[in-house]
Amino acid sequence: MATISIAPFDQLFILTGAGISAESGIPTFREAGGLWRKYRIEEVASPYAWRRDPRLVWDFYSMRRRAASEAKPNSGHFALAALERTIHDRFFLCTQNVDNLHELAGSQRVLHMHGELFKSRCDSCHAPFNDANLYESPADLPRCSCGALIRPHICWFGETPFHLDLIFEALRQCTLFAAIGTSGIIEPAASFVSQVAARARTFYVGPEAPANSAIFDDCILGKSGDVLPVLFTFD
Ligand code: NAD
């Protein structure tokens, strides 16, 4: 199997997507049987949906919380946590996932560009709200002390992802870029590789080539739980 050698000067940017959590039993976005096949996105994951029917939105996210709370990190998550322990601040992990499996595997610094399933915030004043254990949407939807509804801390379709300033700075600095388990369709993450391709080595890891595969130097085809534990070597 191909390996990726990390030199002492390398700055590694890792982008993960739904595929890294697939072996933990969390459905990916588009694959057959995927969670989203059962829902119309615009009815559960958009500002329009929230305005139209906040209870339906909370039912959907409570269900996703229940599913994610039963999942355990897999060997792919553990391999990335071990890599961070080895190269410390030369490692930058950006995930599109809203589950907490990277953290449960031991990753210390994880940027969740699409938000976090177990966090909520005020829809108006944006104050964080502690309801991580809320797995059923209650009879009365939670409200902030300012009176506004509490919403999931999720970047819905049509909203701006989180932490973009930190992410673009890390992309500018990286010398090695690896995307793992992401279909290369959802922007802006799908374009990260083209922003670094002229000066960084770029790799994709997943069972099938992503939509943007032509831009990567190398696509390593396989499940991330099989590939990642033996992928990295050190110069
Ligand atoms: P996607 O569903 O569009 O693509 C998943 C990719 O993972 C596919 O290319 C597939 O080939 C690959 N894959 C499947 N099994 C794999 C495995 N064992 N190892 C490695 N790769 C595997 O997902 P996306 O590109 O991340 O975009 C979907 C959006 O949906 C994201 O924005 C994300 O926020 C959201 N989402 C998140 C979760 C989660 O938090 N776990 C789950 C579903 C969707």
Image (cartoon, rainbow, N blue to C red):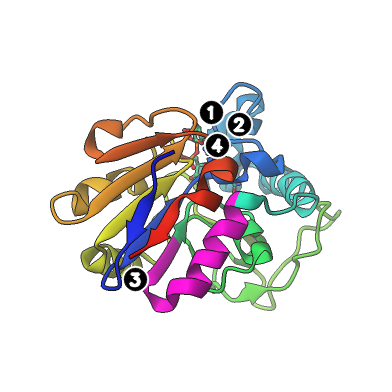
Looking at marks 4 and 1 on the same chain, the residue that comes earlier in the sequence is marked by 1
Instruction: Using the rendered view, name the quadrant where residue 90 is placed.
Output: bottom left
Looking at marks 1 and 3 on the same chain, the residue that comes earlier in the sequence is marked by 1
Residue receiving disc 3:
166
Residue at position x 73%, y 50% from top? Answer: 68
Front position among marks 2 and 3: 3
Q: CA distance from mark 1 to mark 3?
A: 28 Å
Residue at position x 75%, y 67% from top? Answer: 131
Q: CA distance from mark 2 to mark 1?
A: 7 Å
Looking at marks 2 and 1 on the same chain, the residue that comes earlier in the sequence is marked by 1
Label 3 Cα crowd, 10 Å radius (few <14 / some 14-19 / many 20+): few
- Decide whether residue 86 is among the magenta residues: yes
Residue receiving disc 2:
36
Image quarter where the N terminus lies is top left
Residue receiving disc 1:
30
Q: Is residue 24 above or below residue 150?
A: above
User: Which structural element holds mark 4?
Assistant: loop
Q: Give the camera-side residue of 47 and 207.
A: 207
Label 2 Cα crowd, 10 Å radius (few <14 / some 14-19 / many 20+): some
Q: Amino acid at mark 4?
A: Lys
Q: Is mark 1 within 8 Å of ligand 1?
A: yes
Judged by its main secondary structure, the magenta piece is helix
Left or right of 234, for residue 47: right
